[in-house]
Image (cartoon, rainbow, N blue to C red):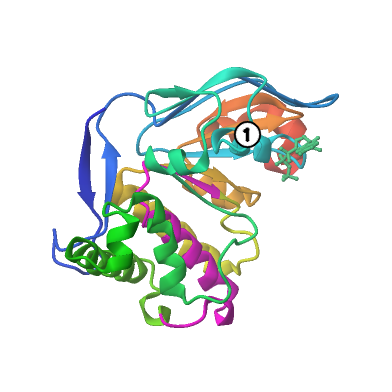
């Protein structure tokens, strides 16, 4: 697969001055393709024959009522669960179950519904933890402080600062993350995922727990990241207003079955979706 490096500069920077970069796929292969995914827990059929794809540069939402199978699907894509049947392809590479460390290497990053930040570390240290899987100089060199590791470390510090500035959290980098407002912690979580330079980013309920203002900021950041990098984004989100506004396409799950798939306009009008999920007032 060929890739190009797309520079992501902080807002207001001169063109090309950004150091933070994302390898955006230039191939026509989907960023993600699922084909016939099935998953059961004992007698519960959590996913039934799910096929689904995400194009490079697309914001693709997965919605559905509680228990529909959204988390199960994300866990299959993340390699936490192995599907009983079906195939997963990421940027053209097929796998049944991939360890998280390898997934990061082929360009998959995610944020978590319940933030998985390190409370005893600063915002900068938390963001930098996203770099762990893409270090180029070896651990020994880092421990010994050899020059390649030193210059890599300086470059990484700069990348952390750039992505933080881009997300508007440059002023809190030295603060312990546990002392920051929840909305800012969510931005730190997003920055940590982005600094790993993914091709595919999975956002698990990025709006949960945010105020109306914070939601608007988060939505603007998600859109800006996609527009500047061409990153493919999977959005799991219960806030339907945000989903309709941000997504290019939406897949709707209900009881483990994909009942609809289309643009926000198509989904809003789909009688099956209205019945199962959106409620009569959305019609
Ligand atoms: N580890 C598990 N063990 C047993 N059953 C599970 C497990 N994980 C999910 N399930 C079941 O699989 C089905 C799908 O659950 P899942 O959590 O994927 O839905 P969801 O759409 O993410 O729901 P929510 O919006 O509430 O997070 C449910 O019936 C759930 O009870």
Q: What element carries label 1?
A: helix
Residue 24 in sight in this render: yes
Q: Can residue 11 be seen in this view?
A: no
Task: Please indicate whether residue 280 sits to the left or right of residue 22 in the image.
Answer: right
**Looking at the picture, does residue 82 appear above or below residue 194?**
above
Image quadrant occupied by the N terminus: top left
As drawn, 123 above or below 117? below
Q: Where is residue 109 in the image (x, y as percent from the top left)?
A: 46, 47
Residue appearing at x 61%, y 69% in the figure = 211
- Which residue is disc 1 drawn over? 73
Q: Does the residue labelled 1 lie within 8 Å of ligand 1?
A: yes
Q: Position of residue 29 (x, y in %)?
A: 34, 24
Q: In this view of the protein, which residue sits in the foreground, 143 or 59?
A: 143
Q: Quadrant of residue 61?
A: top right
Name the quadrant containing residue 192: bottom left
The magenta region covers 174-203
Assess whether residue 62 is covered by the magenta stretch.
Answer: no
Q: Is 181 a magenta residue?
A: yes
Tell me residue 92's x, y (percent): 37, 23
Ligand 1 position by quadrant: top right
Q: From the viewer's perspective, is residue 139 above or below residue 49?
A: below
x then y, percent, for residue 178: 58, 77
The reply, left or right, for residue 135 in relation to residue 100 is left
């Amino acid at each position: 697969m060929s890739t190009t490096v797309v520079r992501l500069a902080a807002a207001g920077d001169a063109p090309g001055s950004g150091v933070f970069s994302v390898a955006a796929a230039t191939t026509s292969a989907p960023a993600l393709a699922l084909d016939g995914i099935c998953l059961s827990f004992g007698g519960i059929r959590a996913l039934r024959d799910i096929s689904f794809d995400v194009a490079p540069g697309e914001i693709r939402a997965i919605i559905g009522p509680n228990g529909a199978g959204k988390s199960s699907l994300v866990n299959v894509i993340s390699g936490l669960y192995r599907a009983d049947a079906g195939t997963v392809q990421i940027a053209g590479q097929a796998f049944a179950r991939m360890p998280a460390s390898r997934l990061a290497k082929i360009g998959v990053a995610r944020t978590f519904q319940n933030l998985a930040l390190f409370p005893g570390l600063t915002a900068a240290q938390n963001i930098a933890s996203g770099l762990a899987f893409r270090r180029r100089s070896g651990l020994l060199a880092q421990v010994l402080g050899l020059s390649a590791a030193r210059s890599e470390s300086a470059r990484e510090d700069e990348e952390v600062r750039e992505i933080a500035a881009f997300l508007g959290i440059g002023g809190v980098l030295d603060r312990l993350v546990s002392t920051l407002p929840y909305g800012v912690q969510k931005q730190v979580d997003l920055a940590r995922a982005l600094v790993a330079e993914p091709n595919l980013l999975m956002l698990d309920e990025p709006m949960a727990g945010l105020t109306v203002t914070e939601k608007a900021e988060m939505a603007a950041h998600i859109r800006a990241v996609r527009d500047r990098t061409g990153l493919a984004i999977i959005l799991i989100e219960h806030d339907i207003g945000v989903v309709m506004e941000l997504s290019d396409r939406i897949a709707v799950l209900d009881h483990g079955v994909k009942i609809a798939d289309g643009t926000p306009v198509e989904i809003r009008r789909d009688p099956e979706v209205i019945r199962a999920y959106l409620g009569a007032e959305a019609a």
